[in-house]
Image (cartoon, helix red, strand yellow):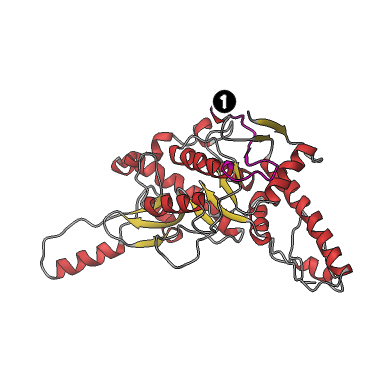
Amino acid sequence: MVVQIPLKYKTSSGAISAVISSILEARNLIIICGAGVSVSAGIPDFRSSQGLFTTGALSKDLLDANVWKTTTKASSLCKTLAQMHQKCSQASPTPFHLALKMLDEKGGLLRVYTQNIDLLESKAGLSFGIPQMHSLQEMPRCIPLHGTLETLACIKCCYQSPLHLHVSTLATGCLPLCPACEQIEHERRMSHKRPRASGTLIPTIVLYGQTHPEGDNLAQAILSDADGDYTKVKPDVLLVAGTSLTIPGVIAAVHKFAQAVHSQESRGGYRSIYLDQKPLSSKWDDVFDAWVSGDLQIFAQHLMKSFSHQFDKSIDDAIHSKDSTTISILVQDLPSEAASFLKGKKHVLLDIEHPFYIPEI
């Protein structure tokens, strides 16, 4: 049975504090993010009352894998993606994204899986990308499930190009031609060979019904995290935030991680937490322990504030015991107006409205 925990704006209830403690005390925390975490950054979601599907601003059939085969629909999607790219480029990380970075720096955050294509997790400072199987490189902290608006890729060859170089073309409703294919065709013409059509560049986002181009690597990452292959320890807390849980692949991942966290020996607290204003259906009763109903940005502020209190206490204890341990957190760049304030200070609290770097002791 899922426990519903209402979220208040200014005060943190005992139940909310228990949820926050579960997150802060996690040793291998998994977070799955949906479109709801970016709404306050000015990037609309899809299914809420003001979502793109609900308001009719975007038709769901435009996000079908076959959209590029229909000239009219492809043109409409190109224009929409050009507008979305502009919004994403101008957007700044929300308090929730900053909380992700805080958890990363604190330690205990195993992985963030994001359904979003806006790259705000990367802007917040998380390492970002899809790991390659059998690679010796460290796995990125944040893994995008549905691609990003960062690049375009040719439908015929392996050529990729930054999307921002082609926004003006997309805004006209056209897909840009692949320059690599064009070069090959130029060489064929010079050699008097039969001409062939050049490929076009399409955004590297995953549409409905499309086979994920990185599906094998993505599945391996999820299985490795759920089974503890990377850390040798399975995840112990799952937080799912800002998603309506309608995409089959995401549903499967949530079930996999929930099974993993509930297989761990209990240390008290909540194991699997759903954070969103929209209610959960009864089919999730055996998956989640708690549903925090409320604004997830307010929850993020409570989370950062709770950690700042813990951090401040640890700083005081370190100062009083003359412990030389360095404790520092990069929440975001130090604003110039804070620089003079910090002169001569040994430590400062995290400021939720204007978070900044906490210097070394």
> Residue 106, percent across and down?
68, 60
Against 6, is 221 above or below? Answer: below
Camera-side residue: 274 or 330?
Answer: 274
The quadrant where residue 126 appears? bottom right
The quadrant of the picture occupied by the N terminus is: top right
> Residue 88, percent across and down?
54, 52
Magenta segment includes 246: no
Magenta segment includes 265: yes
Can residue 85 be seen here? The reply is: no
- Element type where label 1 sits in the image: helix
Q: State left or right for residue 63 relative to residue 317.
A: left
Against 141, is 10 above or below? Answer: above
Q: Which residue is mark 1?
A: 282
> Residue 193, percent across and down?
11, 65
Q: State left or right for residue 200 relative to residue 105.
A: left
Q: State left or right for residue 68 relative to residue 43.
A: left
Badge 1: few (under 14), some or many (20 or more) residues near its Cα, within 10 Å? few
Residue at 46%, 39% (x, y): give it. Answer: 252
Instruction: Give the extent of the magenta segment.
Output: 262-283
The quadrant where residue 326 appears? bottom right
Camera-side residue: 123 or 304?
Answer: 304
Q: Residue furthest front?
A: 265
Residue at 58%, 48% (x, y): give it. Answer: 31
Name the chief secondary structure element in magenta: loop
Q: State left or right for residue 297 relative to residue 8.
A: left
The quadrant of the picture occupied by the C terminus is: bottom right
Camera-side residue: 11 or 106?
Answer: 106
What amino acid does circle 1 point to?
Ser
> Residue 254, percent across and down?
52, 41
Camera-side residue: 337 or 124?
Answer: 124
